[in-house]
Image (spheres, grey):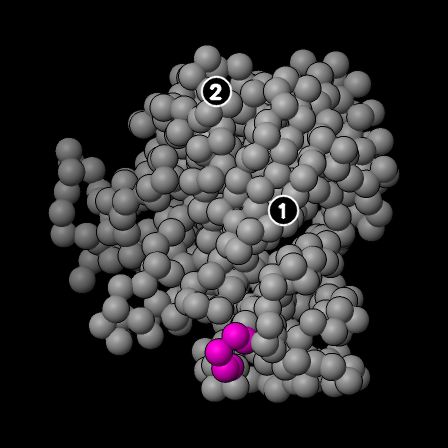
Amino acid sequence: MQTESIYGRSHHRFLLPRSGGMEDGMRTYTYREAEEYILEIPKFAEKHTLAEMRALLREITGDDIHSQVVHIAGTNGKGSVCAYLRSVLLESGLSVGMFTSPHLVTMRERICMGNEMISEEEFADAFYKVREIVEGKNHPSFFEFLFLMAMVYFKKKEPEYIILETGMGGRLDATNVIEKPALCIITEIGYDHMRYLGNTIEEIAAEKAGIIKAGVPVIYFDKRKKSSEVLAQYAKKARSPAILIGNDNILNENINNKSIDFSLNTGYYNYVSLSLNTTALYQVENAALAVCAAEKLGNAQITPQSIKRGLWAMHWPGRMEEVLPGIFLDGAHNEDGIEAFLHAVRNDGCRGKRFLLFGVVADKSYEAMAARVAESTLFDQAALTLLETDRSVSIDRLKTVWIQYKKPDCSFHESAGEALMHLLSCKENGDMVYVAGSLYLVGQIKSFVGKQCTAAGRVSAVQKV
């Protein structure tokens, strides 16, 4: 079988088989080949400067991306705000492309048109175009490569709006090459990725504020005084209109079985009886940001009615998602995320026992997360598991952290599937099982449950994005 280096002429560590087919005289790749290549990128590529990324983007897409771009940064809630805004725009009859991270089951989840993720064929086509341009150059990082692929795809599809979620930080993020977005949104800011973003809320907020552009409106949730002050300073310096949403704007929150009703005063409209198809109370803040963003875009097709429909229609995997009766997945993976998760659990109306499946990567504040879970006394049992990544906290370390607490009772497992099966063997009618600590873990459980459902001859919602 013929092979060629996929790293360029000067790199030969990984060889990719040639595909049999040719299109328009071009070298073609299968989706699996493209995926394998991208997964190898962290082993040999380093992050580019924004100037280098702008040059690559210009070479790949030219200057003819005419879509309006909404750029979103923050610590928690970015993906949910993206999803709520996308849903509102779609319900308003508008076309939307969306780039988010990370993915849970398949890499294709990161690049979507409407509610559909990119097809395998289009993924491979975008991969080829980026691969061809970067040949012989300093190779883009994993995230940069996927971002460039997304922009190739969006150039082809020409959506009216593109929603871009930053990967980490904001100021130096690859997505920050968009020089004139229509709108910027900054979600809740908390302690995460401190090794790269800083050790104080002010330092982290400054990195997130790096997406603010001269004259471009910025919307943010006024939750922490320290972060709000930083964002306000950056907005003022850039002469960017700042739209603040706070708890005072949100009224009459009420959980009804598996939904939440609330009212919202944005300054434009006073919305009464908005409804979210979730029990995760933290989603109210994210929905509020999306509503304000939709209003600020000023498109005549966006109406209070389409906003209301869009909020209700939104589905975002891994955010207090019920994958099977009484089994909920939540992507909480830092202190603030865990606190929001626990707040939602407190209001779940559970009349039986609660069980927790928990796994975490080593660069997170897992000791503080464990302490918050233990202090909540919400869970009778916890199953602690290794993750399928070399970043996982070890079993020995999990034991050291968790056995110091009297509650919950703990068991330790080599795999997430094993941990889930253990908890299900303990679960009785009326009990609830929660999965939290890492989006890696959420993805592994979705995949495991999907395979179990398939093996049982049933089609499961967990297999859908």
Q: Which of 408 and 218 is in front in this view?
A: 408
Is residue 408 left or right of 350 when viewed as pictured? right
Q: In the displayed structure, would residue 457 be above or below residue 33?
A: below
**Residue assigned mark 2:** 303
Q: In which quarter of the image is the N terminus?
A: bottom left
- Magenta residues, as a range? 427-431
- Residue 434 vertical placement versus 178 (above, below): below
Label 1: element kind: strand
Which residue is drawn at the image coordinates 31% and 71% (left, top)?
453
Q: Main secondary structure of the magenta part?
A: loop
- Residue 404 is at least partly visible in this image: yes
Q: How crowded is mark 1: few (under 14 residues within 10 Å), some or many (20 or more)?
A: some
- Residue 429 highlighted magenta (yes or no): yes
Residue 91 on image: x %, y %: 40, 29
- Residue 415 position (above or below residue 163): below
Determine the secondary structure under disc 2.
Answer: loop
Q: Which of 385 and 310 is in front in this view?
A: 310
- Residue under the point 35% across and 44% down: 117
Q: Position of residue 232 (x, y in %)?
A: 80, 26
Q: Disc 2 vs disc 1: which is toward the camera?
A: 1
Q: Where on the picture, by quarter, is residue 61?
A: top left
First of labels 2, 1 by sequence position: 1
Q: What residue is shown at x 61% (from left), y 64% (from top)? A: 349
Q: Crowding at label 2, few (<14), some or many (≥20) Cα neighbours within 10 Å? A: some
Residue to which mark 1 is pinned: 254
Residue 251 lies, in percent from the top left, at 69, 36
Residue 434 lies in the magenta-colored region: no
Q: Give the amino acid at mark 1.
A: Asn
The reply, left or right, for residue 226 in relation to residue 332 is right
Q: Residue at x 79, y 71 (%)?
A: 375
Q: Which amino acid does label 2 sit on?
A: Thr
Pinpoint residue 151: horizontal percent, then vertical percent.
42, 32
